[in-house]
């Protein structure tokens, strides 16, 4: 079992996120994972800092750095996909006889490597990445969206996302999603989708 306090403390940067999600900038809408729990309902907390230099502001709108609402929705969708992927990594470790804590520690160790932290364990990271490459089957979430945009979002703000798996029947899932700025909810609703297995390029092919 994963200790709730340790799971909630999960923090991952953008480099690790890019190993999991297929999107790349400017369409990568998640910068950081800031919290995770598997029970009683799987839940992921993540964020995206919005810079005034975003390419989207060239046309939306000139003279007013107003963040497009569709990108807030995309960010909540990517957070949901990240949640599914983290659950898959966790479940894979448990099926192989290891613990859910070990799965999260392997992800934390990868993040240490990208941060050039002296506590990084390179040998363990190489084994973990090799396993990820071997088991390349992953999930992406194609979603029907029922989300309300409640408040505008501007440059120099941080979007905080929360995605929770509310229902899961086979490959069908429904997520409760929310986005906020400084604790004020700017968007919320549900996303319903099916897991679709695809090839995920966690590591570039040689």
Image (cartoon, rainbow, N blue to C red):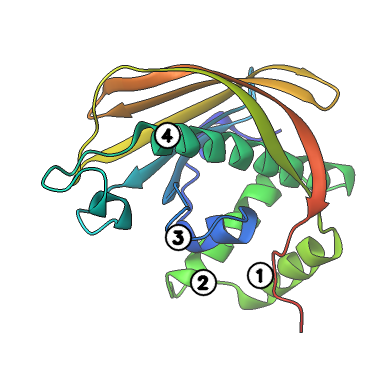
| Residue drawn at 30 percent across, 17 percent down | 150
* In this picture, residue 173 sits left or right of residue 154: right
User: Would you name the residue on which mark 2 appears?
Assistant: 113
Are the residues flagged by discs 2 and 1 in contact, CB closer than 8 Å? Answer: yes
- Mark earlier in primary sequence (3, 2): 3
The answer, for residue 10, to whether it is visible in the render is yes
Question: SS for tag 3?
Answer: loop
The answer, for residue 119, to whether it is visible in the render is no
- Mark earlier in primary sequence (2, 4): 4
User: Would you name the residue on which mark 4 appears?
Assistant: 70
The N terminus, quarter of image = top right
Please determine whether, in this image, residue 186 is positioned above or below residue 87. above
User: Would you name the residue on which mark 1 appears?
Assistant: 125
* In this picture, residue 195 sits left or right of residue 86: right
Task: Quote the CA–CA distance across marks 1 and 4.
Answer: 36 Å
* In this picture, residue 92 sits left or right of residue 121: right
Task: Quote the CA–CA distance across marks 2 and 4.
Answer: 33 Å
Question: SS for tag 1?
Answer: helix
Q: What is the x, y in percent for residue 178?
A: 43, 23
Question: SS for tag 2?
Answer: helix
Number of residues whose C-alpha sits closer than 10 Å to that of mark 1, classed few (under 14), some (14–19) or many (20 or more): some
Are the residues flagged by discs 3 and 2 in contact, CB closer than 8 Å? Answer: no
Task: Quote the CA–CA distance across marks 3 and 2.
Answer: 21 Å
In front here: 191 or 130?
A: 191
| Residue drawn at 78 percent across, 70 percent down | 130
User: Would you name the residue on which mark 3 appears?
Assistant: 25
User: Which of the 4 quarters of the picture holds residue 54?
Assistant: bottom left
- Mark earlier in primary sequence (2, 1): 2
């Amino acid at each position: 079992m994963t200790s709730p306090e340790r799971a909630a403390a999960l923090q991952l940067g953008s480099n690790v996120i890019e190993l999991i999600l297929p999107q790349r900038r400017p369409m990568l809408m998640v910068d950081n994972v800031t919290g995770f729990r598997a029970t009683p309902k799987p839940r992921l907390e993540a964020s995206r800092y919005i810079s005034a230099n975003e390419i989207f502001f060239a046309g939306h709108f000139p003279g007013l750095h107003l963040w497009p609402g569709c990108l807030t929705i995309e960010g909540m969708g990517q957070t949901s996909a990240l949640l599914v992927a983290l659950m898959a990594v966790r479940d894979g470790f448990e099926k192989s006889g290891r613990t859910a804590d070990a799965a999260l520690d392997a992800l934390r160790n990868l993040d240490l490597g990208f941060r050039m932290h002296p506590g990084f364990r390179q040998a363990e990271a190489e084994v973990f990445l090799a396993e990820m490459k071997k088991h390349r089957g992953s999930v992406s979430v194609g979603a029907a969206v029922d989300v309300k945009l409640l408040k505008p979002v501007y440059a120099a703000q941080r979007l905080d996302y929360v995605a929770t798996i509310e229902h899961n029947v086979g490959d069908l899932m429904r997520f409760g999603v929310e986005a906020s700025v400084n604790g004020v909810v700017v968007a919320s609703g549900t996303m319903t989708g099916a897991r679709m297995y695809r090839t995920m390029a966690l590591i570039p092919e040689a």
